Amino acid sequence: MSIGVFDSGVGGLTVLRALRRRLPARDFVYLGDTARLPYGTKSAASVVRYADQAAAALVGHGLECLVIACNTASAVALPVLRQRHAPLPVVGVVGPGAEAAAAASRSGRIAVIATEGTVRSGAYEAAIRRLRPDATVSSVACPLFVALAEEGWIEGEVVELAIRRYLGPLLDQALPPDVLLLGCTHFPVLAASIRRVVGTALAIVDSADTTAAAVARVLDGAGEVAGATGGLRLLATDDGPRFARVGSSFLGEPITPAAVEIVDLG
Amino acid sequence: MSIGVFDSGVGGLTVLRALRRRLPARDFVYLGDTARLPYGTKSAASVVRYADQAAAALVGHGLECLVIACNTASAVALPVLRQRHAPLPVVGVVGPGAEAAAAASRSGRIAVIATEGTVRSGAYEAAIRRLRPDATVSSVACPLFVALAEEGWIEGEVVELAIRRYLGPLLDQALPPDVLLLGCTHFPVLAASIRRVVGTALAIVDSADTTAAAVARVLDGAGEVAGATGGLRLLATDDGPRFARVGSSFLGEPITPAAVEIVDLG
């Protein structure tokens, strides 16, 4: 029995990294739908269909838990996947991310940066307001951050100017937010540059650690898993060499092209 | 009978624009595979499969000519589509782009900027060397330009710094190129910013006009098309409102969301 994790590409490897740190003895199987990435600019209907196919492929591996490590897919496809695969626990990143943001904010003014799809869904606003009905949530779509992270341009002038362009209006408000939630799994690799631009008045939180904590809570009752050895299988729907090259910085450990199995969801 | 044009998304609308200018009485049907864009970061095998499905959908509309208005798909899928749909004329953008570059260069030193997939294919080097065996071709993958064009960040500091970062090594050579070929249909919208960075020593060419000329040559023998009225149908595989919003600047005329028909290729 493995913990299945999926994302549109390599971004979810930041969540996998947090999961492996917290649950080192568990087996994991990760699927990146690189043939159809990004999900963040696609319609909700397409994302639901893609997420459904990705989840079905992972469930075939025998899972104790399914993690949707993609904010866009979590925002629009979580209810469908929970219903389809019940009683398998399905954990998304939006709920845990909202939890982290709500806990970190003193003023209740929370900014969320995410993809177009996630922002359009309103999922973060809803999840944060369920935890803190007094919260003021501002959401900004930052689609270029995905391309910058994929290109490895995570430091330097280009990325800092892009951050300033997207976040300037947020920071210049009379009552600025005190928490910035990274609502896309690509964004944690840009955190150092974001910090340089936004300064220290803002707490930067992401959903990787709180998602790992949520998965650990879900599995608590399940006890030890017989035969698990801390193994990891990496699946992608396209271009293993690119997945390995770009993914290594997201996972925080080297990935060899030979370690990536190509699967077909179409 | 229509001229069918397809691309991974909205970029090919720059080619459609040139086609409509040159062949105003013809009917056109354009398909943007927005559910699976971009093609430029995907493997050749995936791009061939996607292009095959897109071409099949267009051929069903009754075509006098099929235009692959996507450099990545032209680079890897043109032979397959020609064979599959013979005797229908199939025109890609790589040959016409190479023709434009070869004609514009005095020194024979030509730089091509394109997506990862197009650069990896080596299609432009091969096509340019067929026309000018003495040519020295340098290719640079500029994947971030696609995201910048899609985001509408086509002028300003961010885009100029990105251009400088990608093209600096090319321009700083002892014997720099005298022609810069825009080998991706997204890039013409960045041409003014590229010009500001590269200066006037370099001719900037794209494949839109030469592709339109190639299509006109192919159709010359076909004479007038009975019943054609200069009509245009726009199809997309995902998110009509986004296609309309982003596509208008590429087509150079407003697109209403209602004008975009959604089709399923999966």
Image (tube, coloured by chain):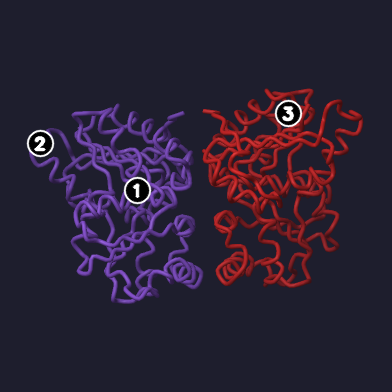
Chain colours: A red, B purple
Question: Label 2, on which residue?
Answer: B222
Decide which of B241, B36 is in the foreground and name it.
B36
**Whole-number angstrom distance, CA of label 3 to CA of label 1:** 40 Å
Circle 1: residue type: Asn
Q: Nearer the viewer, residue B90 or B240?
A: B90
Whichever of callouts 2 and 1 sits on the residue coming sooner in the sequence is 1
Whether callout 2 and callout 1 share a subunit is answered yes
Cα gap from disc 2 to disc 1, whole angstroms: 26 Å
Q: Is residue A31 left or right of residue B169?
A: right
Query: Closest to the observer: A111 or B160?
Result: B160
Distance from disc 2 to disc 3, alpha carbons, whole Å, reads 57 Å
For label 3, the SS is helix
Q: Look at mark 1 in the image and give the residue it sits on.
A: B71
**Residue B105 percent coordinates (x, y):** 22, 66
Q: Residue at x 86, y 62 (%)?
A: A106
> Which type of secondary structure does the marked residue at label 2 adopt?
loop
Which amino acid does the dot numbered 3 rest on?
Arg
Q: In the rendered image, which residue does mark 3 sit on?
A: A82
Labelled pair 2, 1 in contact (Cβ < 8 Å): no
The residue under the point 49% across, 71% down is B161
Disc 2 marks a residue whose amino acid type is Ala
